Amino acid sequence: MKYYLLLFFSVLFISCNDDTPPSYETEDDIIAYLDENNITANRTETGLHYLIKTEGNGRKHAENEKVTFTYKLYLLDGSVVEETKTEGITSLIENLIPGLAEGIKFFEEESEGTIYMPPSLGFGFYDRNNVPAGSVLIFDIKILKISTPEDEILAYLAENELEAQKSETGLYYIINKQGEGAVPTANSNVTVAYKGYFTNGTVFDQSDNGISFNLSQVIKGWQEGITYFNEGGEGILLIPPYLGYGYTDRLGIPAGSVLIFEIKLVKINN
């Protein structure tokens, strides 16, 4: 999934620097800003401050769930660095800068508020486009949605008026054509034609003529899903990330992605 906010995602893994030069902003500057503006905020052990202005519906983020949120990022002097569109951005919390990764966990779905973070939890002590080195960052945020992989799959099925079966592992599959040949085992070598895409329709891989491989060597969603078809069968696999490529970016596939594959089991080779 590609986002237009290049600044935001270019600094996700900046390391912290404890040797903060005196000229850089610190948590004391956050406290002074809050006092000056008569703001009462909560403080965490890391020096993060946050204020919940609108309560949500009670649902908070859990591990490996995605959060969709809008934000406006600005500095202590009030200058706005960047702002999302109304539809917001979607990400695993674990992939955000430390201050957002920590702060968002205090917010419920549909809640709004502000996060104030020292440089060590933000962009660090390096100039980043319009953000001077060592800047305190202020994020006004609104949590639009917190979603599990299954939420994403079910929403896709409903939007496209599809009916699927669910296995015990959480794999969803649709059999459009069962096929009349043999059924592969988890160790079979097979030839499969496929098209792989995300729930937003973006195609990330495709093989119209098919490729051959041993099922024991591919992602778990394929290892399981292909065995639901007879040779010659066709259908769709909707694979949660824990049966796909997991929760780290890999080969152009963002961390935590639900994968959809239209497949045809062309042949069982052995």
Image (spheres, rainbow, N blue to C red):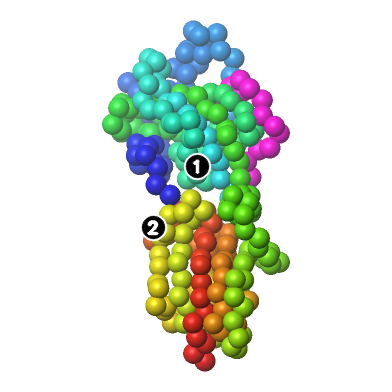
Camera-side residue: 120 or 141? 141
Predominant SS of the magenta segment: loop
In the image, residue 122 sits, relative to residue 197, either above or below, namely above
Label 1 vs 2, first from the N-terminus: 1
- Viewer can see residue 29: yes
- How many marks overall? 2
In the picture of the structure, the residue carrying the numbered disc 2 is: 252
Label of residue 90 in the image: 1
Q: Is residue 59 magenta?
A: yes
Q: Name the spot of residue 107 as percent of width and height, x first.
A: 62, 31
Query: Could you tell me which secondary element the residue under label 1 belongs to?
Result: strand
Residue at horizontal 70%, vertical 32%? 57
Q: Name the spot of residue 236 as percent of width and height, x first.
A: 56, 67
The magenta-colored residue range is: 49-63
In the image, residue 211 sits, relative to residue 135, either above or below, namely below
Residue at horizontal 59%, vertical 38%? 145
Camera-side residue: 136 or 64? 64
